Image (cartoon, rainbow, N blue to C red):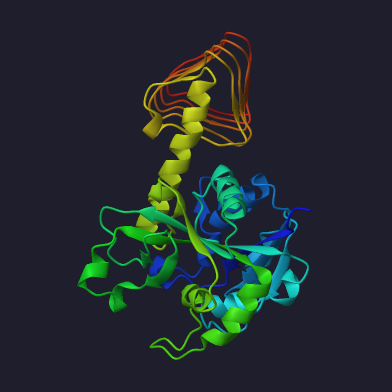
């Protein structure tokens, strides 16, 4: 019998570096809150049980989750990531394996989570950490391991010695742990540190003291696992998801001449042999037929374009239906 897996998503933090009155996980990235991207990846990985830890603006976060089957858990006080996980012990009582993720990592892919699960089972580990490599690891927890690949500890930047600071393999913030070990270990952690918080990373050292196997899953694409902590990183994440979607469209037969400038919402469809020139936007469940041409700078929202339609440069169309091979002249503004 395979292990019962629960995903536990940490979404209780305020995110002070965002300089916002809105909970960080509710900030929009490529047409949806970043928390939803994480939930979609979990669901895509085949993990059906999901617990979301909420705290700051918890009602707003819960209201955003109406389309998802999740178990909410409240973290009344912000006492660290380890404390947040401890709050979910009862909600995870029926699981064998807990996958811990952060709600501010909208670039994580379902395939990556699946691969991590498979590696965890192959290794027979009690605890598996996702890691990645950075040319400049400044500010991140370093992975210290022995010659056999046993992870010995995660050393935070402020606690690292000069040798440890040279390590460029960092903690990716995603964990897989046996439930019976995880919650027992967290109760041992305590809050004797400068922040007075329960650090989730301390479970690595505890696992080693108990003689348990601690392994790593190295993900080569660092951008996929790094969290969004500022508006700069928010824009970077949006751009990455935009490029991923445009790549899928191009591989499916759509010509996009400047994909970094073209924005197509994931609920819109573009037919084969369509051509999208720079600066085009297609949003709001629009349907663009085969062979259509959208010239530079045009904006299409909640429209249906039949096959072969041409929309001239800088035209703006809302709620319109354009017939087969119809030509819309440049600078048209039309609301249906």
Above or below, 282 against 24 in this view is above
Depth check, front residue: 40 or 309: 40
Direction from residue 263 to residue 36 in the image, left or right:
right
Where residue 99 appears, x then y in whole percent? Answer: 61, 61
Above or below, 117 against 290 in this view is below
User: Residue at left 49%, top 74%?
Assistant: 208
Residue with the most extreme bottom position:
192
Direction from residue 307 to residue 331 in the image, left or right:
left
Q: Quadrant of the C terminus?
A: top right
Depth check, front residue: 103 or 200: 200
Residue 5 in view of the camera:
yes
Where residue 163 appears, x then y in whole percent? Answer: 22, 69
User: Residue at left 63%, top 48%?
Assistant: 40
Depth check, front residue: 265 or 135: 135
Direction from residue 232 to residue 213 in the image, left or right:
right
Where residue 1 appears, x then y in whole percent? Answer: 79, 53
State the image quarter where residue 26 is shown: bottom right
State the image quarter where residue 137 is shown: bottom left
User: Residue at left 39%, top 54%?
Assistant: 132
């Amino acid at each position: 019998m395979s292990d019962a897996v629960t995903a536990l998503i940490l979404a209780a933090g305020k995110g002070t570096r965002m300089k916002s009155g809105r909970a960080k996980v509710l900030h929009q990235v490529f047409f949806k809150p970043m928390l939803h991207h994480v939930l979609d990846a979990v669901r895509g990985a085949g993990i059906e049980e999901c617990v979301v830890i909420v705290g700051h603006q918890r009602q707003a976060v819960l209201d955003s989750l109406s389309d998802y089957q999740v178990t909410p858990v409240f973290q009344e006080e912000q006492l660290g990531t380890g404390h947040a996980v401890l709050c979910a012990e009862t909600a995870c009582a029926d699981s064998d394996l807990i996958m811990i993720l952060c709600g501010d990592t909208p670039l994580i892919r379902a395939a990556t989570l699946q691969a991590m699960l498979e590696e965890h089972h192959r290794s027979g580990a009690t605890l598996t950490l996702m890691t990645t490599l950075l040319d400049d690891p400044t500010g991140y927890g370093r992975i210290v391991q022995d010659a056999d690949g046993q992870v010995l500890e995660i050393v935070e930047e402020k606690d690292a010695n000069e040798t440890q600071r040279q390590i460029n393999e960092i903690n990716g913030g995603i964990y897989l742990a046996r439930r019976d070990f995880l919650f027992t270990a967290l109760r041992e952690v305590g809050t004797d540190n400068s922040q007075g918080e329960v650090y989730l990373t301390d479970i690595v050292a505890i696992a080693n003291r108990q003689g348990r196997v601690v392994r790593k899953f190295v993900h080569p694409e660092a951008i996929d696992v790094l969290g969004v902590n500022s508006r700069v990183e928010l824009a970077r994440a949006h751009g990455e998801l935009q490029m991923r979607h445009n790549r899928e469209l191009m591989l499916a037969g759509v010509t996009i001449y400047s994909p970094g400038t073209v924005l197509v919402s994931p609920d819109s469809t573009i037919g084969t042999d369509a051509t999208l020139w720079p600066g085009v936007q297609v949003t709001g469940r629009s349907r663009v037929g085969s062979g259509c041409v959208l010239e530079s700078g045009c904006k299409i929202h909640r429209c249906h374009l039949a096959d072969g339609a041409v929309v001239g440069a800088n035209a703006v169309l809302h709620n319109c239906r354009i017939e087969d091979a119809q030509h819309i002249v440049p600078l048209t503004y039309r609301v249906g």
